Image (cartoon, rainbow, N blue to C red):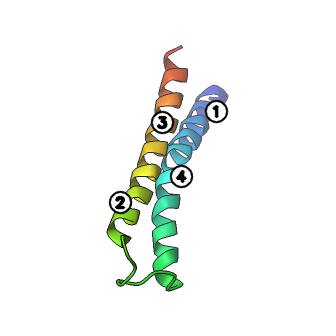
Amino acid sequence: MQKSLKLQARHAFEVIAAFAPWIASMFVLYWLESEQIWTTATPHRGKISVAILTLGMSASFFVYSYFSKQQTK
């Protein structure tokens, strides 16, 4: 029972850690908008948004890949 609980907790941590960069990148976009740091008139806003989301999703992918590789060993 103890080992099963420990494995479930570890899996939950890995999932949270894998999603954290993506969630952080979405929060950065929300924060930039809510604090009115950039507006619709900001040059290259769309490109920057895509770059921020791509960075967050890529980091999530690499974290998930790292944990997946550790499980197969």
Q: Is label 2 or label 1 in front?
A: 2
Lower position in the chain sequence, tag 4 or tag 1? 1
Callout 3 crowding tier (Cα within 10 Å): few <14, some 14–19, many ≥20: few
CA gap between label 3 and label 4 equals 12 Å
Extreme-front residue of the structure:
43
Q: Is label 3 or label 2 in front?
A: 2
CA gap between label 4 and label 1 equals 21 Å
What secondary structure is marked by label 4? helix
CA gap between label 3 and label 2 equals 18 Å
- In this view, 54 is above or below 12: below
CA gap between label 4 and label 2 equals 17 Å
User: Would you name the residue on which mark 2 appears?
Assistant: 50
Depth check: 61 or 51 in front? 51
Q: Identify residue type, mark 2.
A: Val
Lower position in the chain sequence, tag 1 or tag 3? 1
Residue at x-position 54% and y-position 48%: 16
User: Would you name the residue on which mark 4 appears?
Assistant: 20
Which image quadrant for residue 2?
Answer: top right
Residue 67: x and y in percent read 53, 30
